[in-house]
Image (tube, rainbow, N blue to C red):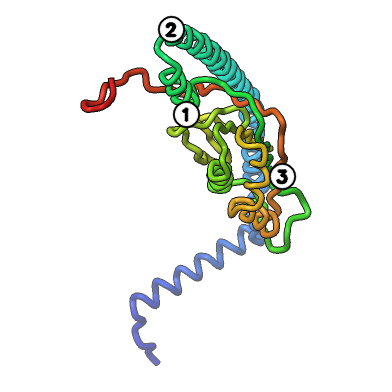
């Protein structure tokens, strides 16, 4: 009896299976891996981990040193800037005194106008009665549902408070020792509030010179109500008190140093 001829593909598969079976019989049972190769791999992995750890340990001190050096540079430059600002304030006070001496012979009306301009532009420091407003971030426990990121004094909160003091009759205002003028910006950069481009930290002390009842006027106005609402909604802390004597320093911002006579105006 003749067997039907096998398909070429079937023959190849059958022969391959037979060869594999014979090889398995000679070599014994199979294993999941060569122990020597596995040990070599583990040793290589360990070497890589040790190298990475060593590199991290060697990089961290260098990075920390660079960070400390940068922080020290920032502190040094900040101290220099504050010293320069103090010198500028002193020089402006001296200039103001010289101007008063030079204009004494020009009449009382001229001296009063010059003084008003100096006060309005922040050219000179002032001292007098007024109010002190202190604003600070919320402290735990926060009102229910309030995110800690929302429980902080924002630039718009400070702007509202300052505008309320102006409306209540303030003549001069400073925030944490920074004098406000008509060109002073109150902005936010990152998590810091910038006043005249200088970063401030809470608590924020707002000194305002004005009428003796300035604190009462502020508290009973819209700005006072807004601060009360901020405390209720977000836990923002604020307190305004009357003061017999408030000191507001001169501005250290760049002030106009040129003027032109307007045609048709008084000479």
User: Looking at the rendered structure, which numbered label has been put on residue 120?
Assistant: 1
Q: How far apart are labels 2 and 3 at the CA level?
A: 43 Å
Foreground: disc 3 or disc 1:
1
Callouts 3 and 1 close, C-beta under 8 Å: no
> Which x, y percent locates residue 94?
52, 9
Q: Nearer the viewer, residue 253 or 100?
A: 100
The residue identified by callout 2 is 102
Quarter of the picture holding the C terminus: top left
Secondary structure at badge 1 equals helix
Determine whether 33 is above or below 175 in the image: below
Circle nearer the N terminus (3, 1): 1
Quarter of the picture holding the N terminus: bottom left
Circle nearer the N terminus (1, 2): 2
Q: Residues within 10 Å of mark 2 (few under 14, many from 20)?
A: few
> Which x, y percent locates residue 135?
67, 42
Residue visible at 26% across and 27% down in the picture: 265
Q: How far apart are labels 3 and 1 at the CA level?
A: 26 Å
Q: How far apart are labels 1 and 2 at the CA level?
A: 20 Å
Q: Nearer the viewer, residue 180 or 53?
A: 180
The residue identified by callout 3 is 239
Q: Residues within 10 Å of mark 3 (few under 14, many from 20)?
A: some
Determine whether 91 is above or below 49 in the image: above
Secondary structure at badge 3 equals strand
Q: Nearer the viewer, residue 37 or 23?
A: 37
> Which x, y percent locates residue 67?
60, 24
Determine whether 253 is above or below 156 in the image: above
Foreground: disc 1 or disc 2:
2
Callouts 2 and 3 close, C-beta under 8 Å: no
């Amino acid at each position: 009896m003749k067997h039907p001829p096998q398909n070429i593909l079937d023959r190849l598969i059958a022969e391959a299976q037979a060869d594999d079976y014979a090889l398995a019989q000679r070599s014994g049972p199979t294993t999941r891996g060569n122990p020597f190769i596995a040990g070599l791999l583990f040793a290589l992995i360990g070497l890589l981990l040790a190298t990475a750890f060593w590199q991290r340990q060697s990089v961290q001190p260098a990075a920390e040193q660079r960070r400390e050096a940068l922080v020290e540079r920032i502190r040094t430059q900040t101290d220099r800037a504050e010293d320069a600002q103090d010198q500028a304030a002193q020089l402006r006070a001296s200039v103001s005194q010289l101007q008063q001496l030079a204009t004494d012979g020009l009449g009382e009306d001229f001296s009063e106008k010059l003084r008003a301009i100096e006060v309005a532009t922040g050219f000179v420091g002032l001292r007098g009665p007024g109010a002190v407003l202190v604003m600070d971030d919320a402290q735990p426990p926060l009102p229910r549902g309030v995110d800690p990121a929302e429980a902080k004094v924002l630039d718009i909160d400070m702007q509202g408070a300052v505008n309320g003091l102006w409306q209540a009759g303030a003549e001069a205002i400073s925030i944490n020792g920074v004098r406000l003028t008509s060109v002073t910006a109150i902005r936010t950069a990152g998590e810091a509030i910038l006043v005249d481009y200088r970063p401030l930290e809470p608590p924020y002390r707002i000194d305002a010179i004005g009428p003796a009842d300035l604190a009462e006027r502020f508290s009973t106005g819209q700005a006072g109500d807004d601060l009360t609402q901020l405390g209720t909604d977000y836990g923002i802390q604020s307190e305004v008190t009357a003061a017999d004597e408030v000191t507001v320093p001169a501005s250290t911002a760049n002030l106009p140093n040129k003027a032109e006579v307007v045609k048709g105006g008084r000479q």
